[in-house]
Amino acid sequence: MAYKISDDCIMCGACAGECPVGAISEGEGKYVIDADTCIDCGSCASTCPVGAPNA
Ligand code: SF4
Ligand code: SF4
């Protein structure tokens, strides 16, 4: 199960820099996680100021 970013995302970009496999990119209105690349490490969730990424 890959992590997913909810609509709570405020597009700060912090998570993208923390992802060890580069799975996070800027989408329309929020950042998005590529499910095939995500290794479920949880770094994005612990970095996000608004708790948008969830398992
Ligand atoms: Fe990247 Fe880890 Fe978040 Fe998956 S859980 S998107 S690998 S930081
Ligand atoms: Fe969105 Fe959170 Fe990532 Fe910032 S850290 S871009 S608010 S998901």
Image (cartoon, rainbow, N blue to C red):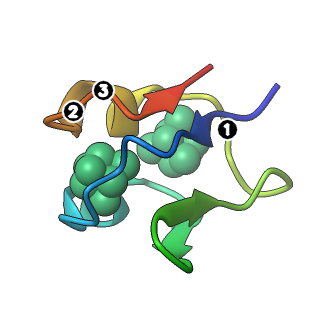
Query: Crowdedness of circle 2 by 10 Å Cα count: few (<14), some, many (20+)?
Result: few
Name the residue located 24 percent from the left edge and 67 percent from the top edge: 13
Give x and y (percent) for residue 44. Answer: 36, 39
Asked if disc 3 is less than 8 Å from ligand 2, the answer is yes
Quadrant location, the N terminus: top right
Asked if disc 1 is less than 8 Å from ligand 1, the answer is yes
Query: Crowdedness of circle 1 by 10 Å Cα count: few (<14), some, many (20+)?
Result: some
Indicate whether 7 appears above or below 27.
above
Q: Which residue is mark 1?
A: 39
Q: Which residue is mark 3?
A: 51
Numbered circle sitting on residue 50: 2
Q: Amino acid at mark 1?
A: Ile
Q: Could you tell me how far apart the alpha carbons at marks 1 and 3 are, in whole angstroms?
A: 18 Å
Q: Quadrant of residue 16?
A: bottom left
| Tag 1 near tag 3, CB within 8 Å | no
Front: mark 1 or 2: 2
Give x and y (percent) for residue 17. Answer: 26, 65
Asked if disc 2 is less than 8 Å from ligand 2, the answer is yes
Q: Could you tell me how far apart the alpha carbons at marks 3 and 2 are, in whole angstroms?
A: 4 Å
Q: Amino acid at mark 3?
A: Gly
Q: Image check: 51 left or right of 31? A: left
| Tag 1 near tag 2, CB within 8 Å | no
Q: Amino acid at mark 2?
A: Val
| Tag 3 near tag 2, CB within 8 Å | yes
Judged from the image, the secondary structure of the residue bearing numbered disc 3 is loop
Quadrant location, the C terminus: top right
